[in-house]
Image (cartoon, grey):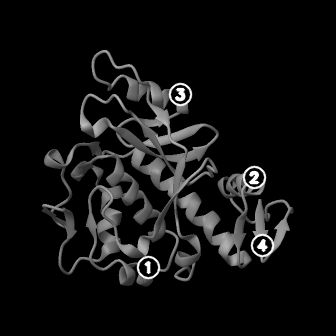
Amino acid sequence: MIIMMGAKLQSPPPTNLSDLEKNIYDALLKSEFPHQYQSWKHLRFELLLRKNIIEAANKLAHSSVEFKVFQDSKFNPRYWTKTQGGYLLNPFVLPSQAIEDIFQNGQEYSFECSTAIVVIYYYAVLNSINLEAFNRIFPNLLVWDWSYDEDLRIITKVGTDFIPGDVLYFHNPDYLYPVWIGENAVYFGDDQYFGHGIGIKSKEEMIRALNTLRKPNAQKSAYLLSQYSRLDFLYLSQFSY
């Protein structure tokens, strides 16, 4: 349910929304859990950013970026330097340009699924807020695994209130190699998920893919955890256009 300034909202989506934003609005409206908003601008920004998260995930899914563990990974050295902790933004490089390059020159990049989620988040935020604000609040990017700037504000909660644009986690307890202990996936809605290294799949297809990556004689199936991650939409909305 959508709670707007303390009152339950029951109206249909505004007519100026894209089809994807309307689907997200409907999911929020039909949710049995309350989603609180301080203003229409707050709600409108969340719809935009969720849409951009899904579109960024779809763009990455169809890019040339490969799946690799850290020791075999690469980032474009024009923008990034590899350190022990991840890939650090080069001096005198705009954060916006470095993030854009991942999606424009995918052949220069390879990383694993959690890094993919952080990259998707940055790209989605870049396309949702003021360019100058993006470069100001993310000046010293370090990207790898779940390393991210505190201003990105990723919030993870236990539960099944899955809304399109959320990031979910498929756990694989009987993995063969540690890199396949699970898969972080962007939820598109309509039983579609994107996980880097596996692709855009249904829930059952994602589980089947992970089950092929288990140790010999594995007894436990992969499964979707009852948890979700999302950004602090209210905080980020202050930097919107």
Q: Secondary structure at mark 1?
A: helix
C-alpha separation, residue under disc 1 versus residue under disc 4: 28 Å
Mark 4 surroundings within 10 Å by alpha-carbon count, few (fewer than 14), some (14 through 19), many (20 or more): some
Quick one: quadrant of the C terminus?
bottom right
Q: Which residue is mark 2?
A: 32
* Residue 97: image location, x then y, percent: 32, 71
Mark 3 surroundings within 10 Å by alpha-carbon count, few (fewer than 14), some (14 through 19), many (20 or more): some
Vertical comparison of 142 with 33: above or below: below
Residue drawn at 42 percent across, 84 percent down: 132
Vertical comparison of 178 with 2: above or below: above
Residue 72 in the figure: left or right of residue 132: left
Q: Earlier in the sequence, mark 2 or mark 3?
A: 2
Tag 2: residue type? Answer: Glu
Tag 1: residue type? Answer: Leu
Q: Earlier in the sequence, mark 2 or mark 4?
A: 4
Q: Which mark is residue 204?
A: 3
C-alpha separation, residue under disc 3 versus residue under disc 1: 39 Å
Cβ atoms at labels 1 and 4 below 8 Å apart: no
* Residue 86: image location, x then y, percent: 20, 61
Mark 1 surroundings within 10 Å by alpha-carbon count, few (fewer than 14), some (14 through 19), many (20 or more): some
C-alpha separation, residue under disc 1 versus residue under disc 2: 35 Å
- In this view, the mark in front (1 or 4): 4
- In this view, the mark in front (2 or 3): 2
Q: Which residue is mark 4?
A: 4
Q: Earlier in the sequence, mark 3 or mark 4?
A: 4
Vertical comparison of 76 with 127: above or below: above
- In this view, the mark in front (1 or 2): 2
Q: Nearer the viewer, residue 164 or 8?
A: 8
Q: Which residue is mark 1?
A: 131
Vertical comparison of 133 with 186: above or below: below
C-alpha separation, residue under disc 3 versus residue under disc 4: 35 Å
